[in-house]
Image (cartoon, rainbow, N blue to C red):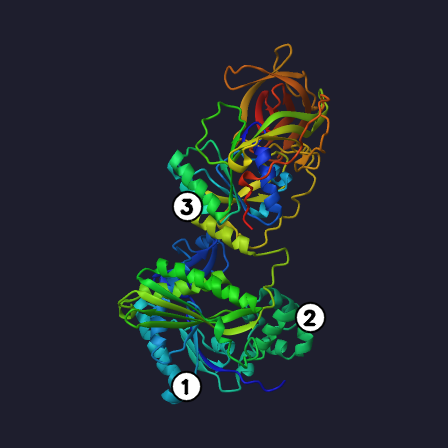
Amino acid sequence: MVGTGATSLALNLASASSLAGSWVVVVGLPELGLAAAAEAGIDLRRLALVAAPEPGRWAAVVAALVGGVDVIVVDGRAPLGHGEGRRLASRVRERGSVLVPVTPGSLGPVRRPGAWPSDVTLSVAHGRWEGLGDGHGHLRRRRVRVEAEGRGRAARSRRAELWLPSERGPASTLPHGATTAKGEREAEATVVPFPGGRRAG
Amino acid sequence: MSPETVVRTLVVACPDWSVTAAGPPPTEPAAVVRANRVVATSPAARVDGVEVGQRRREAQGRCPALVVLEADPGRDARAFELVAAALERFTPRIELSRPGLAAFPTRGPSRYFGGDEALTAAVASAVDEALADLGWPGSAGVGVADGAFAARHAAGPGATRVVAPGGSAAHLAPLPVSVLGRPELADVLVRLGLRTLGAFAALEPADVVARFGADGRVAHRLARGLDERPPATSPPPRHLEVVAELDPPAERVDVAAFVAKGLADELHARLDADGLACTRICILAETEHAERSERVWRHEGALSAGALADRVRWQLDGWLNGPVAIRPTSGITRLVLTPDEVVAATGRQLGFWGGETAADERAARALARVQGLLGTDAVSVPELRGGRGPGDRVARVPAAAVDLAADRSPPLGADAPWPGRVPVPTPALVPPEPVMVEVRTAAGAVPGVSGRGHLDGDPATVSFGRGGAPVEVVAWAGPWPVDERWWDPEGHRRRARLQLQLADGRAVLVHVEGGRWAVEGIYD
């Protein structure tokens, strides 16, 4: 998950598992808004936060969580070597956890992301907020176009239009073939599957 | 009440076992802490007012010289092997509930040693000898009674006691209901005016079941001096036994424990298939040189696969890493798990709000591993609180301070309306410290908020960082003025929050305080 909207996207992806009883652990990302996590639908009783480890220990910490925790959200800006990334990827596949590296849009310069493994890269291509006027109203919802690019089974690139967040909080898809604000018809409006399509039971 | 035979049992109870195992002498104030709560204390610490259940901070407050030790079941089991070995001289079949609490049926040994009193005295002196090696002579209690529960409560600290056959119920009658180890039940009973086990035992069993359910029935049976369940009439089916041959022999605990984990899972699957749960398990390990370690472990509820594997690890740890005198001379070649007592699986009662599940258990273990890597303070969990700011509504509390598997419902007032709160959605990114920015009106002035909550100019541009290029504000809302902690001269702050939508598609939550603007959250 990269760029503007990446954090909300990650929280919403994790919320589906969280509601099904899975644990979600966030490694790093000290600026993550926990109230927003709750609004996205993550059960705070099954959320734990791990402080950012020292540079050389990210792989060890994430490896310790793989298998024990179903969804691991990790700061994509954290340094990780290519070899470590590959080893971690095979461990994640073997144990059936989901690893979600997030590189959020930030105010300052964006650091070079580490070599975190990902089968699918999701990015928000176009986002537009609604509800705010000139000194009145408040942010209600944001319409985004999410693009997915991947490898292997997920190689075909896909797009989806979502409310992120919707007015009720969690993300919701727009109906198939809905017209965008500009009037153009979207050919495809599907939710992108979870990275790799694997989930622990 | 139909006469029911209860197995006459001898219990050896070491009340402060976790402290004993950790090493400090009884004269030193020490406490063992798990999840930030005191779980065991030394006698010296109790004198200073340290009690089980206190928070670590509170215990240290009562006794500044307190030695705080982390709980380690492996260490407890290793040390208890010394006591278990001493008991094995009396009978081959000792039963462990947990490290620090051992029992065996007295029928055979009692006849051999010439009566319960003689047996008790012999056991007490043998246990004392073993405890003297650890520096805790006279700390264990030995009790004999009909049923393990009565025997355990006959065994006071440092005392021996033999309750006459048939006298268990009378012996238990004056004890308070809290000894049942069921705080919720005890609380209700006390409020009903039933303060002692005798008063509780006098109730009709049918009434107890009707009011308190299956767990109440177990407690009632204990109060009447019976075992938790009526004695099993037939031994468990043989096909439930699981065996693993280890080749090459396992010299180290972790290697054997790995095999044990697989065995425990297999046994659990077989029990599940038969709709059974195991309450007592016999674990046998054999070495190349035909040395054996055989123990029976019992559990008041049913043993889960994880609990089974833990017990195998404790036993092997105590045997392989225990005192030289009892350590085997070669690697383990064979492991056998035999269910000793099975009951129909009624399903484990989950907590009222879901409570502990397998996923919680796994997650707690994984997080414990991370705590081992990074230190206990590295892991925190969110806790809902009330508040106005985006970062105030949920706090991060150290995971060590809460029991992850227990229910953690939000405190009262967390959902209460907070006047001045910015409407949802809440920013997904909240920088730990607000980031200073420059906000300008179209005319280039810095807008401010008046005491009445009016903005004196529309924000038109924002620049991030020093000399950053200004970004156009396409829409905005606010201000949401906040006057917090006006009663507190130190904590008093007046600020106003605004939502800004930027030309590049981003939206941010900014606040102005004393004429300075800062980003408090990013709607990422």
Q: Quadrant of the N terminus of chain B?
A: bottom right
> How many other residues sit within 10 Å of disc 1, few (<14), some (14-19) or many (≥20)?
few
**Tag 1 subunit:** B
**Which one is in front in this view, the residue at disc 2 or the one at disc 1?**
1
Three-letter code for the amino acid on which mark 3 is drawn: Gly
Q: Is residue B122 above or below residue B407?
A: below
- Measured in 3D between alpha carbons, the distance from the residue under mark 1 to the one under mark 3, in whole angstroms, is 50 Å
Q: Where is residue B435? Give x, y as percent.
A: 53, 25
In front here: A149 or B138? Answer: A149
Residue named by callout 1: B108
Q: Is residue B309 above or below residue B200?
A: above
Q: Where is residue B140? Give x, y as percent.
A: 40, 73
Three-letter code for the amino acid on which mark 2 is drawn: Arg
The image quadrant that residue A157 belongs to is: top right
In front here: A185 or B106? Answer: A185
- Going from the N terminus, do you reach mark 2 or mark 3 first? 2
Residue named by callout 2: B211
The image quadrant that residue B89 belongs to is: bottom left
Residue at 60%, 65% in the rendered image: B347
Three-letter code for the amino acid on which mark 1 is drawn: Gly
Residue named by callout 3: B375
The lab-note entry on whether marks 2 and 3 share a chain reads yes
- Going from the N terminus, do you reach mark 1 or mark 3 first? 1
- Going from the N terminus, do you reach mark 2 or mark 1 first? 1
The answer to whether any part of residue A75 appears in the image is yes
